[in-house]
Image (cartoon, grey):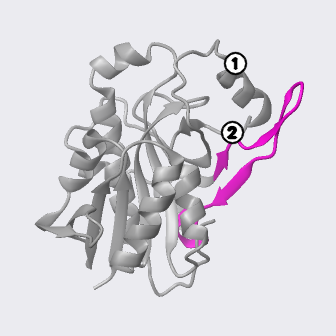
Amino acid sequence: MPCAVILTALPVEYNAVRSYLTEIQEKVHPQGTVYEQGIFSENGQVWNIGIVEIGAGNAGAASEAERAISYFNPHVILFVGVAGGIKDVSLGDVVVSTKVYSYESGKAEKTFKPRPEVGLSAYGLEQRARAEARKTDWLHKLPIVPKVPPKVFVAPIAAGEKVIASTESEVFKFLQSNYGDALAVEMEGGGFLKAAHANQQVSAIVVRGISDLINNKTEVDKEGYQEIASYHASAFALHILAKFNLGVKTDSGG
C-alpha cells in the first residue's frame, strides 16, 4: 500500500485533513512526536496516510518533515493548510506550489538585497495538480460547495516568518516588488521543501487554501475562512493523491 505524509501547522488544518481518513490510529515517534495514521481510499487507490500538526514556522517544518520522512518512509509528502492571498486569488481558492520562495533570505546592506532560496515541487505532483485544476470533480469532496466554486491555481508561493496583516506593510510591498509571480504567502513551505530536497526518494508539494487577502485578516478569520480554506486545500490535496500514478518516476521537491 502506498504511503503519504501530510503536515499541517494549525489545528483547523489538521482536523480538515483528518476528516477524510478512516481507520485512524495514533503513532508515537521514539522522540515523542505524536502522529495519527489512517486510510484514504478513492479512484481504485488506497493510501496509508500519516498526519501531524507541527505549529508555525519554516525551521520547524524542515525538522518535522525530515523526522516524518525517516519514520514513515513515504512515497509522497505534502504540506496542507491556509495562506494569505497576494494577488489574483479569492477567499477559498486553492494555490498549489510550483515553487516556494524563502523570501527572508538575503543580504542586509543599506537596502535589503534578496537572495532567495527556492524550493521546487515534485514535477509529477505539479503536473497532476495542473491536470486536476482544469476540472471540477474534486469539488464533490467538499462538505459544502460554495455558490461560487473555488478555483485552483498552480503557481509560486512565498514563505517567511512573519504574519502579514496589511497591504501597506513593508513586507507586503517587498513581496510585490521582488516576488511578483507569487500568489500566496505562508510560513512553512520553504523549510518543508528544503527537507524534501534532502530526501530525493520522496515527492513533495505544498497545497494552500486562501483564508485571507492580507487586509481584514482578523475579520475574515472570525467568519470561518480558515476552516473553509483548510477543507478546500485538504480536498484538493487528497484528490491529487487519488489521481497520482506512483508508477511514473518523478523528481523530488527541492
Which residues are the magenta region? 100-126
- Which residue in the rendered view is the most extreme toward the right? 110
Please state the horizontal and vertical placement of residue 84, each as a whole percent of the image.
50, 31
Above or below, comparing residue 13 to residue 202 in the picture: above
Amino acid type, residue under disc 2 in the picture:
Glu
Which residue is under mark 1? 170
Please state the horizontal and vertical placement of residue 94, each as a whole percent of the image.
45, 43
Please state the horizontal and vertical placement of residue 39, each as a whole percent of the image.
19, 71
Q: Nearer the viewer, residue 176 or 242?
A: 176
Label drawn at residue 145: none
What residue is rendered at 71% in x and 39% in y?
Answer: 181
Above or below, comparing residue 48 to residue 34 in the picture: below
Mark 1, Cα crowd under 10 Å, few <14 / some 14-19 / many 20+, is: few
123 in magenta:
yes
Q: Nearer the viewer, residue 1 or 90?
A: 1
Amino acid type, residue under disc 1 in the picture:
Glu
Which residue is under mark 2? 104
Q: Quadrant for the N terminus, please.
A: bottom left
For mark 1, give the secondary structure: helix
> In the image, is 213 to the left or to the right of 12?
right
Mark 2, Cα crowd under 10 Å, few <14 / some 14-19 / many 20+, is: some
Above or below, comparing residue 254 to residue 199 in the picture: above
> In the image, is 2 to the left or to the right of 28?
right
